[in-house]
Amino acid sequence: MSTYRLTVSAVFVAIGTLTANLFYIPVGVSKCFPMQNMIDALTGALLGPVNATIIAFVISLLRNLLGTGSPLAFPGSMIGACLAGILYKRFHKIPAAMLGELFGTGIIGAWISAFVSSFLLGKDVPFYFFVAPFMLSSGGGVILAGFLLKTPLFAQIGQKLLASDTRAHKE
């Protein structure tokens, strides 16, 4: 892994952890966090599915350790980030990453969160209870990510990541 890729990853972890207190939507046993969804889509497109999933895990872990998250942060964010990265890698289109994050968090993450809620939190909650808030949170996050990915700053970051990966593979 290049130093640049590691630095970009660390910046995303810091932003995700620090913004946890700024804006979230409390819904029942979960806290919906659009900034996390934005970071998932951004990292999926810029860094790929593996790094995006690791970043989502680290942010979720730090948020839980700091008391600003819940155990439900893990399945939604990690699946959304991974699917965003997989779809972007496959299609090389920003809407593909956005759709991956939306479906990964809003549907698959909500489904798995219903199981997590039952087993870890002891609260039997139906799957559809999580779909609306997770989709709302993901929707806001992917819209922000879509706008940011089209800015010159993020285009430059993507180009530098690609260049650093090319140099790392040649060595």
Image: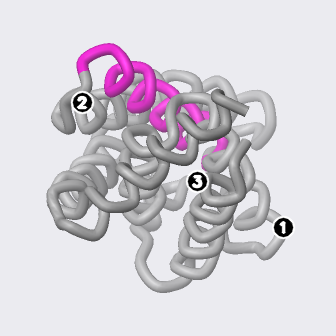
Q: N-terminal of the two: label 3 or label 1?
A: 3
Question: Crowdedness of circle 1 by 10 Å Cα count: few (<14), some, many (20+)?
Answer: few
**Residue 96 position within the rendered picture, expressed as x and y whole percent measured from the top left:** 23, 27
Question: Crowdedness of circle 3 by 10 Å Cα count: few (<14), some, many (20+)?
Answer: some
The quarter of the displayed image where residue 156 is located: bottom left
Which residue appears at 71% of the width and 66% of the height?
Answer: 63
Q: Nearer the viewer, residue 76 or 164?
A: 164
Which residue appears at 38% of the width and 22% of the height?
Answer: 89
Q: Nearer the viewer, residue 155 or 108?
A: 155
Residue 29 image label: 3
Question: Crowdedness of circle 2 by 10 Å Cα count: few (<14), some, many (20+)?
Answer: many
Q: Is residue 98 magenta?
A: no
- What amino acid is found at the position of numbered circle 2 in the picture? Leu
**Mark 2 vs mark 3: in front:** 2
Task: Please provide the residue range marked out in magenta.
Answer: 73-91
Mark 1: which secondary structure?
helix
Q: Which residue is mark 2?
A: 99
Question: In the shown orientation, is residue 67 left or right of residue 39?
Answer: right
**Extreme-bottom residue of the structure:** 22
**Extreme-top residue of the structure:** 90
Q: N-terminal of the two: label 1 or label 2?
A: 1
Q: Evaluate whether residue 17 shows in this view.
A: yes
**Residue 125 position within the rendered picture, expressed as x and y whole percent measured from the top left:** 54, 33
